[in-house]
């Protein structure tokens, strides 16, 4: 068996992904899918969501609209960043590792704040577990050794 982590097909074959890279890429992909699906569902029922928030919180429609948008925009932005990172990271793009790490780390922090505030749901626990898995995979020694370093702009 080759020691350079290439399949038996020879040196021209694609390198084998370390387990930490697979875990990180899959976790980022699943989180991206969850966030983008949530964003799409929220967008499709935007007016209903605004009405429900306005009624439940007893606030005006404009305040409810701002609240729903403030929930929608981070989901879509983080979902897109994680989708791009999950796609390009297994292709050994160093920027994808760092953007995935930043987005996953931010998601861990935001989800922990949500849990501390008492909003504990199965979805938030799943999101936290997957985000932690992504961060752990992105920081693993095997990942550091597998991804080439960022090039300096000079």
Image (cartoon, rainbow, N blue to C red):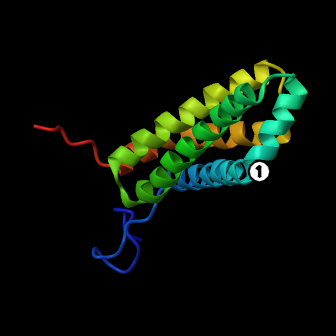
Please name whichever residue, 9 or 116, is drawn nearer the observer in this view of the structure: 116
Q: In this image, 82 relative to 109: left or right? A: left
Residue 64, placed above or below residue 19: above
Residue 102, placed above or below residue 147: above
Please name whichever residue, 36 or 94, is drawn nearer the observer in this view of the structure: 36
In the rendered image, residue 5, in percent from the top left (x then y), is placed at: 39, 63
The residue located at (60%, 51%) in the rendering is: 32
Please name whichever residue, 120 or 17, is drawn nearer the observer in this view of the structure: 120
Q: In this image, 56 relative to 102: left or right? A: right
Please name whichever residue, 151 or 16, is drawn nearer the observer in this view of the structure: 151
In the rendered image, residue 40, in percent from the top left (x then y), is placed at: 67, 54
Numbered marks: total = 1
Q: Residue furthest bottom?
A: 9
The residue located at (71%, 41%) in the rendering is: 127
The residue located at (28%, 73%) in the rendering is: 11
Q: Give the residue pinned by disc 1.
A: 45
* Quadrant of res 7: bottom left
Q: Quadrant of the N terminus?
A: bottom left
Residue 116, placed above or below residue 51: above
In the rendered image, residue 4, in percent from the top left (x then y), is placed at: 34, 62
Q: Residue furthest top?
A: 117
- Element at label 1: loop
In the rendered image, residue 126, in percent from the top left (x then y), is placed at: 76, 42
Q: Quadrant of the C terminus?
A: top left
The residue located at (47%, 59%) in the rendering is: 87
Q: Residues within 10 Å of mark 1 (few under 14, many from 20)?
A: few
């Amino acid at each position: 068996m080759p020691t350079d982590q290439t399949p038996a097909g020879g040196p021209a074959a694609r390198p084998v992904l370390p387990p930490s890279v697979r875990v990180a890429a899959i976790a980022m992909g699943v989180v991206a899918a969850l966030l983008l699906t949530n964003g799409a569902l929220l967008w499709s029922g935007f007016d209903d969501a605004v009405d429900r928030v306005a009624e439940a919180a007893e606030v005006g429609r404009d305040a409810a609209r701002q609240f729903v948008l403030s929930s929608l925009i981070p989901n879509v932005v983080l979902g897109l960043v994680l989708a791009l990172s999950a796609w390009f990271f297994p292709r050994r793009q160093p920027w994808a590792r760092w953007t995935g790490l930043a987005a996953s780390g931010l998601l861990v922090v935001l989800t922990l704040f949500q849990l501390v505030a008492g909003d504990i749901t199965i979805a938030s626990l799943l999101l936290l577990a997957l985000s932690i898995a992504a961060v752990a995979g992105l920081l693993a020694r095997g990942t550091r050794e597998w991804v080439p370093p960022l090039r300096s702009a000079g």
